[in-house]
Image: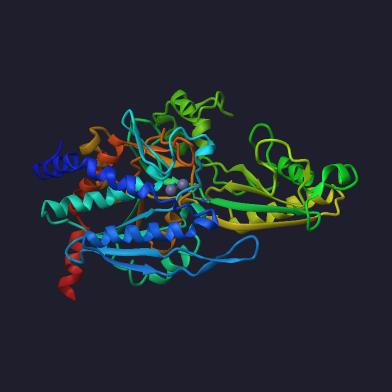
């Protein structure tokens, strides 16, 4: 149950919920799509808006330049700056660093949205809009939590640091270098890292996440020449790039979802008896999860098989074909250059570099059997590592308590099939505790046409983060350790 202090904060959050939603509306209105080069300025504008909000909170904000990156056509494009901010620097307090991103996946009304994707719209307690849950809502919930302490003139019992990026959806370009560079400076006094950029496993039951898959993204380019051709003038006498590409893409997975690239499963961590039991104990409603997806049948029937294939086995998804005619109607053309995009969600203990090599070699072999004179080019625009944490870390204890206080129930301990590149970077480079604390529900439809966060989850999520600050401050050890260091200095 909650304390007097918590009740005071919760009351403030409840009373100000419409203001918090108004700010989310202003944020969702910014088309900060990091994938389409033409919208890069909007991403930068969104990063600046976030920086303003943090400054208004009293935080010291640095905007770190990340340089530029190369597009597939060879042009170079400026990356949006990265936010490093801090609020409080009391050596007696533990320091918590929050990570989030303010860029979004592409969205167009014509994709099938019922509401305008960039106008946050409330329907039956749900706030629909691109970025509502991934990840503008959770970033704001963290800021709202700090803001509530400030407005009530209450001391925040932890030092807060923020790292907010604008390129997560594009694979967190430029990020790893900064984490390495800042390890001995900005991150040196961080005790705990908290990421809130994934979803619960259920529509109602809160969760705590201790693992995520990585991702290797591939581009497969097939080209026959410089110009598109009339299919009446050339169809039947040339090797068409699209036919080659479809054959290549079709060679990647079989009908049961098994990846056909030799060696891909070789290093995947073997399943232990202990781990098996963990899956058996999880509460997971297959029907609810199926309804959320809108598909009628999954590749697997049991809870254990489904969760293992989401969390601990690799998967391969085909995302799209650049250069293919995709508008309504018929265009009788033979595209001269097509680029297939697919990615492999990788898991412990797969080796990224071996994986890349295996895939490229496999595609070259399949292509060579086609005797096509076309040019094949395979590249890896981005990749990220999987992450698994120790759930016995005190940070998880604090979060469990906070969840119990706010939601009145214990969290489901879960992993996630998606990727947040920074998780493994934090763990590997800083060696500190890393935790994912989602506030979005399983039906939030990330990356889809009905993305939303519920008013309930956004507001309870704000309370959850405020409670987490209080619970982290109560943790033994860290405080003592800190005051010991200060007294001996
Ligand atoms: C889980 C997070 N909200 C997310 O959507 N991450 C992206 C990151 C990514 C990986 N490869 C390219 N982008 C994802 O998992 O797709
Ligand atoms: Zn995200
Ligand atoms: Zn995302």
Q: Is residue 391 visible?
A: no
Is residue 199 toward the left or the right of residue 464 in the image?
Answer: right
Residue at the far bottom: name it: 489
Residue placed most toward the observer, 59 or 44: 44
Give the image quarter of residue 55. bottom left
User: Where is residue 318 drawn, in percent x and y?
Assistant: 63, 43
Residue at the far right: name it: 237
Residue at 25% of width from left, 47% of height from top? 465
Residue at 13% of width from left, 56% of height from top? 155
User: Where is residue 207 drawn, in percent x and y?
Assistant: 35, 38
User: Where is residue 43 drawn, in percent x and y?
Assistant: 44, 57
Residue at 52% of width from left, 40% of height from top? 271
Q: Is residue 93 visible?
A: yes
Quadrant location of the C terminus in the rendered image: bottom left
Is residue 362 toward the left or the right of residue 192 in the image?
Answer: right
Residue placed most toward the observer, 23 or 269: 23
Residue placed most toward the observer, 250 or 3: 250
Is residue 296 toward the left or the right of residue 15 in the image?
Answer: right
- Say how the picture is coloured: rainbow
Number of numbered discs: 0
User: Where is residue 103 drawn, in percent x and y?
Assistant: 43, 53
Is residue 329 toward the left or the right of residue 334 in the image?
Answer: left
Quadrant location of the N terminus in the rendered image: top left
Residue at the far left: name it: 4
């Amino acid at each position: 149950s909650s304390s007097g202090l918590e009740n005071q904060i919760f009351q403030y959050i409840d009373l100000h919920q419409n203001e918090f939603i108004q700010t989310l509306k202003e944020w969702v209105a910014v088309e900060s799509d990091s994938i389409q080069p033409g919208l890069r300025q909007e991403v930068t504008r969104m990063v600046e808006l976030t920086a303003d909000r943090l400054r208004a909170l009293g935080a010291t904000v640095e905007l770190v330049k990340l340089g530029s990156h190369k597009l597939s056509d060879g042009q170079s494009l400026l990356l949006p700056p990265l936010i490093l901010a801090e609020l409080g620097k009391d050596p007696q307090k533990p320091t918590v660093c929050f990570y989030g991103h303010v860029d979004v996946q592409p969205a167009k009304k014509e994709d099938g949205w019922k509401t305008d994707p960039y106008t946050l719209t409330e329907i039956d307690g749900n706030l629909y809009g691109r970025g509502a849950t991934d990840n503008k809502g959770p970033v704001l919930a963290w800021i709202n939590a700090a803001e509530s302490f400030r407005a009530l003139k209450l001391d925040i019992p932890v030092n807060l640091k923020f790292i907010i990026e604008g390129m997560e959806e594009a694979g967190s370009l430029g990020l790893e270098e900064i984490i390495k560079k800042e390890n001995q400076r900005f991150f040196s006094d961080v005790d705990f890292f908290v990421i809130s950029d994934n979803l619960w496993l259920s529509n109602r039951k809160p969760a705590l996440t201790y693992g995520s898959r990585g991702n290797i993204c591939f581009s497969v380019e097939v080209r026959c020449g410089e110009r598109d051709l009339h299919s009446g003038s050339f169809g039947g006498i040339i090797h068409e790039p699209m036919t080659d590409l479809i054959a290549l893409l079709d060679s990647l997975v079989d009908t049961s979802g098994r990846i056909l690239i030799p060696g891909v499963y070789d290093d995947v961590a073997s399943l232990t008896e202990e781990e098996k039991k963990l899956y058996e104990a999880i509460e997971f409603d297959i029907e609810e999860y199926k309804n959320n997806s809108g598909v009628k049948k999954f590749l697997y029937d049991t809870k254990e098989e489904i969760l293992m294939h989401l969390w601990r086995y690799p998967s391969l998804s085909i995302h799209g074909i650049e250069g293919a005619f995709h508008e309504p109607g018929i265009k009788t053309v033979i595209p001269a250059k097509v680029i297939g995009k697919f990615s492999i969600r990788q898991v412990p203990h797969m080796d990224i570099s071996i994986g890349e090599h295996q895939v490229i070699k496999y595609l070259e072999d399949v292509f060579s059997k086609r005797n096509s004179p076309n040019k094949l080019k395979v590249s890896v625009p981005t990749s990220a590592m999987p992450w698994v944490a120790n759930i016995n870390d005190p940070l998880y204890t604090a979060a469990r308590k906070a969840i119990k206080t706010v939601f009145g129930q214990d969290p489901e301990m879960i992993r996630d099939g998606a990727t947040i590149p920074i998780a493994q970077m934090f763990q590997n480079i800083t060696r500190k505790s890393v935790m994912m604390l989602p506030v979005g529900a399983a039906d939030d439809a990330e990356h889809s046409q009905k993305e939303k966060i519920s008013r309930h989850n956004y507001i309870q999520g704000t309370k959850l983060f405020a409670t987490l600050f209080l619970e982290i401050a109560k943790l033994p050890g860290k405080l003592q350790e800190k005051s010991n260091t200060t007294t001996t200095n």
